[in-house]
Image (spheres, grey):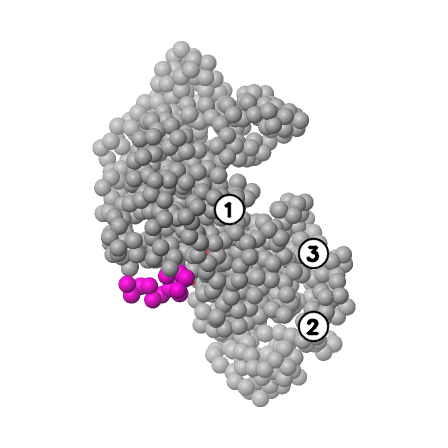
Amino acid sequence: MDYLKGLNPSQQQAVLQTEGPVMIIAGAGSGKTRVITYRVAHLVQKGVDSFNILVLTFTNKAAREMRERIMHVAGPDAKNIWMGTFHSVFAKILRVEADKIGYPSNFTIYDTDDSKSVLRAIIKEMSLDDKLYNQNFVMSRISASKNNLVSWQEYQQNPDIQADDFSSGRGQLGKIYENYVNRCFRAGAMDFDDLLYKTNELLKTHNDVLYKYQNKFKYLMVDEYQDTNFSQYLIVKKLASINQNICVVGDDAQSIYAFRGANIQNILNFEKDYPDLKVFKLEQNYRSTQNIVNVANSIISNNKEQLKKNVFSEKEAGDKIKVMRAFSDNEEGKMTAEAIFQDHANKGMKWNDFAILYRTNAQSRSMEEGLRKLNIPYKIYGGLSFYQRKEIKDLISYFRLTFNPNDEEALKRVINYPKRGIGDTTVDRIIVSAGQNNISPWEAIVNPTQFLDSRTANTVANFGMMIQSFQVITKTMSAYDSALYIAQHSGLLKDLYEDKSVEGLNRYENIQELLNGIKEFSEREDLEEKGLDIFMQDVALLTNDDKDKNKDADTVSLMTIHSSKGLEFPQVFVVGLEENLFPSQMSLNSRTDLEEERRLFYVAVTRAESKLTISYATSRFKFGTLINCEPSRFLDEIDAQYLELDFTAKKAPAGNPFFEDERSAWATKDTFSKPKAATPATNIKTTSILAKAHVPTPGFAPSDTSGLQVGMEVEHERFGFGKVLTLDGNKPDIKATIFFKEVGQKQLLLKFAKLRIV
Ligand code: ATP
Ligand code: MG
């Protein structure tokens, strides 16, 4: 059991406690995920059949990485462990058991776009005001109901819910919910929430099925337990109820999905559900330097609702946390890129040692621009998934329709794409007639003469026959050959090929990429079944990150804080620390929401291993207009002893009304505190930071340093006066080592250094 040496005593105990209920609630970076990984490896080593282990992770990527590590310790047997997200694991089970709840095993998984499209159609058919019944609002209502296991019948009968809906003038929500459920069922489709809702239904109504999986999964483990919702909580509880070998790990301070129904109560319930519960504490953070851990602790201590934890690091104190101020979002992107470039050049770091984290996807634009200008390779995680792109969804819709011709959303997408003369009116007529006759639109398509005039009926019937021909070929051909056949014979490939615009070319290439992916899938040796239908099963659950072939590529990572959960990087930049952005405007009205934003900030800073940089801009473009931004209150909350201000931003371009001269702002104003929040304490801490800053000579401007030589005296905008010790490297990447009187020795990349020769 050599592998246990990589664990501290509390972690070892948690790993060795394989029987009975176990809970680990501990701070970020304390090795919770590591404990799960070692625990599984230990179980397999101990002789537990790997088919009997279920591990639920937050992303599929996390599951893949964990599996690789387990295989390292426990050997190839680990291949058989059931591991993945709640959605992917239970989609797999639902496919096996689908007939028991009236679904075909090749049911479609509707993604968010599909669900919204169904809702739009229903709202239109019911002649409701689409502003009052805004699709996003309706969708979140239905989603919340499903995640709390409230059926449409219960929804309509619940007096509180009804009173609530009627008082807001939205009395039809229950009816929309009912129609939505029926519409999805008729289409043989489940939305994301259904994957959990239907699993609960299945386990509740079919004791034999429940029993089967209770016996199969003798050992259950759940990572990121703080972000499970009620529906997930109940599935886990049911599955574990016989063997009770359940281990959950999480951190209440990192609960960031309450807006999607995650319930911190699940942690508290856990103690009630399992009186024999063994709780393990992990307090040492192995990820980050002391400064980073201290900053994280100082952030989270502002939250009232949290379980007390004592998190410490035994790593070095490390650099202070750098705070950068930019005069605009573009400048922020530029400064971030430059900082990355410098450390890459000067410290021999790899690009993938860096991550840029932001609150909203829209912030990636200015970051990308900055990175592109310096030719820094980067990859955006999350965002619009490859599988959400129009052309990819179009082709995939042909596949969906082939395997599930009742899939109404896929049908609507491709029935007239590429154009074949079936207009919207005809499509509407098909759908409405199908509804009236209680048949699916597909049944109407293969038997169109009773609903449509003969010419249109003929065109529609041809479309139906084309899909039927696809159904035939997919039975005999490989996944790749089928996919290619469908891409060609649907006319889609030709349509894209003929579009010679840059975008058209791009779309054509994306289709080629999808086909390549399917080819790789058809050639996989570890799979027994590899038809196109099997490839399609999980496709709705895939994200960009799953597609990534080149996962070891050396690139800077860009992602929202939400998607950075569980990850770690040597250097992290958290950008956009501004009021109304982070914390977001929506969170300012209640303490609960504000505390969730603060936890999000805690998650962001705890991703960093050795260096953390936080930045904000004093102005930013929002919806096309330049707005003035105030620094985030979160900055003010951090204990200033851990911070180092880096205000190297240049003067604003003439005409920017929001940018005050850097130095006068420094000298005269409490930089972070907003007037209402200013207390003597905050003044003192800000002044103490300011005292350390070099005040440049009046009129200071960085000058041409191409003639710089060893021994020369220089002035740096921030570090003050110093003397050049060495010059290394070739133009344009010359590095200067300079001894500064105030701050000591620094190595600077000349092309970025704000220096003048004195
Ligand atoms: P998060 O809350 O962010 O998900 P976590 O508690 O899951 O964090 P891990 O990701 O498991 O923490 O561990 C953080 C880092 O510390 C990882 O790089 C891990 O390998 C390392 N680590 C954990 N425990 C030890 C240990 N006992 N010895 C050495 N390294 C460790
Ligand atoms: Mg973790």
User: Does residue 325 appear to the left or right of 495 in the view shown?
Assistant: right
Q: Circle 3 sits on which residue?
A: 630
Q: Position of residue 345 (x, y in %)?
A: 48, 72
Query: As drawn, which residue projects farthest toward the bottom?
Result: 711
Q: Position of residue 272 (x, y in %)?
A: 47, 44
Instruction: Name the amino acid, label 3.
Output: Glu
Q: Residues within 10 Å of mark 2 (few under 14, many from 20)?
A: few
Q: Residues within 10 Å of mark 1 (few under 14, many from 20)?
A: few
Q: Circle 1 sits on which residue?
A: 268
Instruction: Name the residue nearer the viewer: 547 or 228.
Output: 228
The reply to whether the C-beta atoms of the residues labelled 3 and 2 are less than 8 Å apart is: no
Instruction: Name the amino acid, label 2.
Output: Ser
The answer to which quarter of the image holds residue 451 is: top left
User: Does residue 373 appear to the left or right of 682 in the view shown?
Assistant: left
Q: CA distance from mark 1 to mark 3?
A: 37 Å
Q: Circle 2 sits on which residue?
A: 688
Query: As drawn, which residue projects farthest toward the front?
Result: 275
* Point 54% across, 86% down: residue: 725
Q: Position of residue 58 (x, y in %)?
A: 43, 48
Query: As drawn, which residue projects farthest toward the top?
Result: 450
Q: Which secondary structure lies at badge 2?
A: helix
Q: Is 336 contained in the magenta span?
A: no
